[in-house]
Amino acid sequence: MMRLPGMVDVHVHLRVPGGEHKEDFRTGSAAALAGGVTTVLAMPNTHPPIVSRNDWNIAQEKAFSESLCDVFMYAGASAEHLDQLPALGEKAVALKLYMDQTYGPLRVEGLKALSDIARLWPKHKMLAVHAEGTSIAVGISLAAAYNRPVHFCHVSRKEEIELIAAAKQQGLPVTCEVTPHHLFLTSADAEHLGSLVDMRPTLAEQRDVDALWDHIETTIDCVATDHAPHTLDEKNAAQNPPPGVPGLESALPLMLTAASQGRLSYERVVDLMYTNPRKIFSLPEQPDTWIEVDPDAKYVFPDHPLYTKCGWSPFSDFPMQGKIRKVVFKGRDVVRDGEVLDYYS
């Protein structure tokens, strides 16, 4: 049996407020625990979006009272709410800046607005950006111009990861994450999974996936799920199905499987899903928290009823190796062989 720390997911959509029919703090945190994740950072593109101190206070208090693991809320960057950034900077774990397509109203455009946000957000708090293609270069420029840390979410293309690698070589304060779906799926999978695997960024070509794996030991800092649940009815809608896939329960099993295949070490999995996320986002330690994994156990995912409220996974029927046997959270057994204990009490 292998003991690992409780994992950290720095990019999760828990749909509160406004999307509770897809996920809520209880179901999302249960899904996290079932997947060996004990700390979650929740995104602000909710309905309404979390762009004010009052909005953030309400959401964070609800997260604390309803979640089964630690859930910390992002604030959302908005050109119309620049006056809120100092107050939000005192409390929010990080600021999310949407520079490209997003499911919600938080996209920021224009050099002045982007510069104001990068300048006003406290340097000791992370500025996490949704940037694709040439927007990656803009994000790197903001890091260089304002000498402030910038974290790139869900990097998915060869040219993007290579540009970030070059920026790191120049000593610029940038970090990045990749998602399991961009590591384990390609655009070819969309041909048979259809709208179920429509997400932003979209699935990439094999050359892009290969480039991510080429940088998994060096350039990439974190693996984060971008857990973005929608109901099957929504995903199968004839017109405009929403982008996003769930991932909290499959991420660690996928990375353990890759480690069992020699694609990276178990130590590197811990770096990507615990050590680096905790350091980059200055997260508090969790006392008496760990997970137990049987690295030799083989099974077909999922090996338990899914806890995410949406009830499906793009990785259903995937063969996995590395079974989560137990999760201990702050001294309490909370998961045993896929079952979240006391979930229904």
Image (cartoon, rainbow, N blue to C red):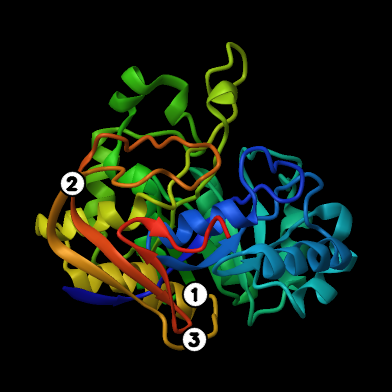
Q: Name the residue under label 3.
A: 285
Residue on which disc 2 sits: 299
Give residue 222's position: percent from left, percent from top.
Answer: 39, 64
Quarter of image, res 331: bottom left
Q: Are marks 1 and 3 in contact (CB under 8 Å)?
A: no
Type of the residue with mark 3: Glu
Element class at badge 2 = strand
Circle 1/circle 2 CB separation < 8 Å: no
Camera-side mark, 2 or 3: 2
Cα distance, mark 1 to mark 3?
23 Å
Residue 296 picture location, percent across and down: 10, 60
First in residue order: circle 1 vs circle 3: 1
Residue 256: percent from left, percent from top: 22, 59
Compared to residue 220, the image places residue 275 above or below, namely below
Per the rendering, the mark at residue 173 is 1
Please determine whether, in this image, residue 193 is positioned above or below residue 205.
above
Around disc 1, counting alpha carbons within 10 Å, would you say few (fewer than 14), some (14 to 19), or many (20 or more)?
some
Tell me the element at label 1.
loop
Residue at image point 45% right, 34% down: 202
The answer to whether residue 77 is above or below residue 285 is above
Q: Which of 263 and 289 is in front in this view?
A: 289
Q: Is residue 294 at least partly visible in the picture?
A: yes
Q: Is mark 3 on a helix, strand or loop?
A: loop
* Quarter location, residue 36: bottom left
Does 207 sit left or right of 43 as displayed? left
The image quadrant where one finds the C terminus is bottom right
